[in-house]
Amino acid sequence: MKNVKNIVNNVMAKNNCSTFQIEKTNFAIVGIGASAGGLEALLAFLRNVPKNSGLAFVIVQHMEQLRKSELAELLQGATNMKVIQVTENISVKPNCVYVIPPNKNMSIQSKVLHLFTYAEPHTLRSPIDYFFKSLGEDEQCWSVGVVLSGMGTDGTSGLREIKENGGAVFIQEPSTAKFGDMPNSVIEAGLADVVADVEAIPQKIISYLENRPRLNRNCDEQPDKLMSYIETIIQLLQSKTGNDFSSYKINTIHRRIERRMSILEIDKIESYISFLQENLQELNLLFKEFLIGVTSFFREPLEWEMLKDKVLPALLSERLPNDTIRAWVSGCSTGQEAYTLAMVFSEVLEQLEYSQDFSVQIFATDLDLEAINKAREGVFPLGIKEEMSNHCLNRYFIKVDRGYQVVKSLRDKIIFAQQNMIKDPPFTKIDIIACRNLLIYLNTEMQKKLIPLFHYSLNPGGILFLGSAETVGDFTNLFNTFDRKSRIYQRLQPLIQEEQVEFPTTFSAVKPRIHPPAVTAKSIQLLADKLILQNYSPATVLVNKKGDIIYITGRTGGYLEPAAGNANWNIFAMAREGLGYYLSDAFYKTLKQNKEVVLNNLEVINESGTRLVDISVKPISEPEELRDMIMIIFNDAVTTNVMETTSKTAEVSLSSQRASELELELMQARKFWQITSTEMQLIKEEYKSSNEELQSTNEELQSTNEELTTTKEEVQSLNEQLKKMNFELQDKFDYLLLISDDMKNQMDSMKIAALFLDNKMCIKQFTNQMCEVSRLIFSDVGRPITDITSELVYTEFTEDINKVINTSVTVEKQIMSLNGDWFKIRILPYHNLEGIKDGVIITYENITESKDVESKLCKTIEDLKHRIVELGGDPEKESYSEVAAGRASESVESKICKYSNHTIV
């Protein structure tokens, strides 16, 4: 129990933001990012910060370039704290507010603020991301990020760095922000710990910071229960998400559980477990908390330069020009490193003579499905321009509304997929594996399983690219480094494969459990002494599965002795004469059967002669720290034989006995060799069978790949056909638009009102001239014509329309309107292109002028008749009626002139 408490205390000591002493000497720094609409939010925020909060506030507000900032003066009126516009090398102190000046980038180091001027003042900038990243690196768990109102996505990338280093993220409720783009971007990225109104955020920050040390002291009071609590939480996560986090480092798991408890203001871990069981949403949030990953383009640029200048050219020189270069980016997060590798490959291939013959295929995997989906989309915020050169930005990205999008040619090189390295099969025949800053979250045992797995996945001479804090550990026989300071390794082919590679199916076969940090030699001694004193008193040796001696108790000189040559602490090399074969046989039986094996009355020869010994070989399952180790106990056998060596006869007898023993050992050695040979043959056959199955599986995968390639070609062909059809449809659409324009212009030029009705007398369309006839507006389309008020005195209108619809006979009438105008109405059947009746067309022609002329003509004729009568003529003999009917040989005008002249005379 004492040792477990020490383990837990060591874990908590490693978490540099969990000790009470640090709490006294440190204070939290709150970074606040805002943009458009941020002034109102900042004023509301500062008004709600309590007096003497003990916090420091650093405000990064987007401001116009080359303009004197008045922000500090405006903010001073909202708070009693001192508001300072930042100057170079100013130290941050609690209960103060610091405001970034215009046209500057700002960072923090050791609580000192530094300013940087933009080299290109007219380019888009991301000062919030820039400061948040430095704040997370410098202040670790004492950093707090706040994002208020603003447009764009500035701040999202920097908050990821704050969360990764143990800080907290508080976001203004987007619905209360004047511009919600920046808060929404953080929420969509899954980085927000608290989303609240801006007035409530200061108190929530203080509650979070005050609750954290109370949690740590509570954990320290009951360290023996912490391991079981964490195991319970991991099992809850596994049942909910199907992912096992028992292989993660316990201090990482502890720190992130602690963060969630602090956010929720829960001070007891057992209360948090109850909360998890009742709130499935919190399980999802904790799962996302475990998966937070920091990534960026060209992270650690010197490593990428070495990859570009030395490593990849050397790798490609060993490949044929028509080979496909296969790469695997494990733990790709949102895809930045996968796209970086694709860009570096493109740059390197351009420098080669046969660059067009090489093809690159990159498999990018991650456990987080949401991150994979974002990686597939290939859209990144504007802040990425700080992470790469203008050459890469302009060549491989396109500016879009939400930031920058990867060009299609680069995107096609990468296949994104969800994968859990701990339980899913690895990719094989890979030329380069990039697994950067993923192993640091896994415990040592899992790292020792993954490094040989990477070796298995790589082709001969393949490249393993690790993060700056990661190494291949003890597997220097499998990998060779390119450079002493780099973390780029090349695959070696060992002469002898010492251990069989374990695959993820083997990993998951083990019962999930928490793996505590590796115990020290002192801890092993204490545990072994305790176990031995409880159960045994004779000479005892504790060994691992390879037979290497871990710990010895009692006098073992009569059974073991150091081997000649280089120091070798393997028990089989140290076993005295007479014990080697039997001890080895019992040891491997114990490993295979996982049960105790006892050997009695074995003869061992040492300096004092021959003695009989009983050996017990026992596997250990408890305690947890000694699991999978083997304990070997030596006991002198009880015997009444006394060996005398005084006479020559006895010496001869002893020599004969020794010869018999040697013959027996030789026979046993031969028997052991035969058994071993048989087992090797069986193993060889099993390997051969497995190899055939793998080859068969490989052929199936190749066949599937060919089918997918064929399907891809078919899809591409279909896509080209669709594009062609789309172009044709676009041409037809443009042609129809042209015809529609011609028809409209023609109808407008004719100045004829036209109305189109369907078979149900509903309006389909009408010309602009219809406003002279009826009060039609565009929204009347679709309404029945009977619902529309008309100025015409046309009572048979509906009957005439039905007559035309039913008989297809054209109806033509002259109708007068209420204002005295006359219209000539034609109702014609409407036929579609297939010749089917689909309504009617009604045209309205204004004939008011013609009616006026006709009325005047009739009046003139009547006047002429009266004059003829007065002159004694006979109107009936004159052809006035013909004139009125339009059939006289003389024109109406000439007749009128004739009789007018006669009247004048």
Image (tube, helix red, strand yellow):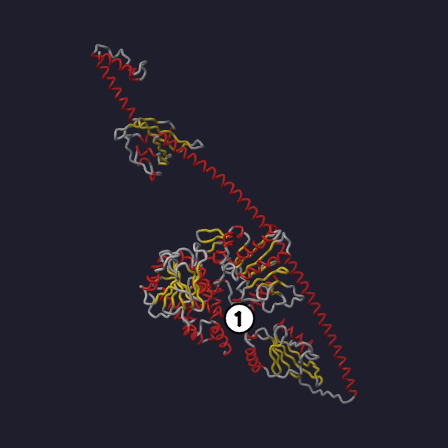
SS label for mark 1: loop
Give the labeled residue for mark 1: 515
- Residue 693: image location, x then y, percent: 64, 58
Amino acid type, residue under disc 1 in the picture: His
The residue at the point 65 percent across, 63 percent down is: 493
Instruction: Kindly identify the residue that appears in the image at 68 percent across and 86 percent down.
Output: 639
Task: Tell me if I can see residue 322 in this picture.
Answer: yes
Q: Position of residue 487 (x, y in %)?
A: 57, 64
Considering depth in this image, is 522 or 791 the residue closer to the camera? 522
**Is residue 531 placed above or below 30 in the rendered structure?**
below
Q: Residue furthest top?
A: 872
Q: Say left or right for 786 vs 629.
A: left
Of 864 and 579, nearer the camera is: 864
Q: Position of residue 900 (x, y in %)?
A: 24, 14
Number of marks in picture: 1
- Residue 694 occupies quadrant: bottom right
Instruction: Measuring from the top left, give residue 714's x and y in whole percent.
Output: 56, 46
Q: Is residue 704 visible?
A: no
Which quadrant of the rendered structure holds the C terminus? top left
Question: Which of the 4 image quarters holds residue 63?
Answer: bottom left
Q: Is residue 398 above or below residue 209?
A: above
From this view, report whether residue 659 is shown above or below residue 779. below
Nearer the observer, 46 or 692: 46
In this picture, residue 83 sits left or right of residue 651: left
